[in-house]
Image (cartoon, rainbow, N blue to C red):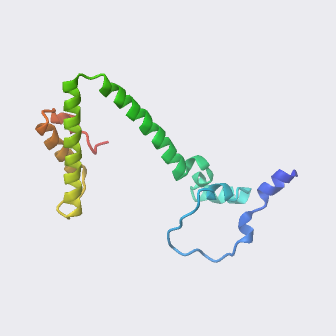
Amino acid sequence: PSAKRKRLNSCKLDTFPTTAPENRAYFFNDQFRGNLCKCDKCIARYTEHNITFITKTEDSLQAYEERGNSEREREESSFNSVIQNLPHAAKCNVARAMGSLQEGIRDIVAQISEGKEVLTPDLIRNKFREMAAANNIDPKYFDNIGKK
């Protein structure tokens, strides 16, 4: 067999102690996925435990954050271009609605942190309905919050 194939089938886990790990949370550095053993025996273990994703570098937190950041940047750019093309009065309405939304979310968080409310889809839906009514928006737009 080739040296590469031989390397793939030599298991990194054979060099580790066989004691069972403690039942606790673990935090790994960004490169841990690349350091995982990928021999046939370990790939079979990952498959058996339904964790084959663990070897995929594109499934890392950093990869998710990068995708999220680029998506957020695209959305912000799109939003900003739409806002720039609005008349002044409409820009004022958007700013007022965003302030109302921020205040509403702050109220929800305060109620939850004070133990007055439990976070549920109904709480969010009702709060958005209240905000809609206060801003002359049809509350039906918020009927599907929390529904699949």
In the image, taking residue 46 as reference, residue 90 lies left or right, namely: left
The quarter of the picture where the C terminus appears is top left
Residue 1, percent across and down? 88, 52
At a point 70% along the width and 72% down the height, the residue shown is 16
Q: What residue is shown at x 64% (from left), y 60% (from top)? A: 45
Q: Position of residue 94 (x, y in %)?
A: 23, 32
Residue 142 occupies quadrant: top left
Seen in the picture, residue 137 relative to 57 is either above or below; the reply is: above
Residue 82 drawn above or below residue 126: above
**Residue 21 place in picture, x, y as percent:** 58, 74
Residue closest to the far right: 1
Identify which residue, 78 or 108, lies in the foreground.
Answer: 78
Q: Position of residue 69 (x, y in %)?
A: 46, 42
Residue in the picture at 14% in, 36% down = 135
Q: Is residue 112 above or below residue 20?
A: above
Name the side, left or right, on which 99 lies relative to 81: left
Count of residue discs: 0
Q: Which residue is painted at 22% across and 52% down in the image?
A: 106
Answer with left or right where residue 5 lies relative to residue 72: right
Most extreme residue toward the bottom is 19
Depth check, front residue: 109 or 127: 109
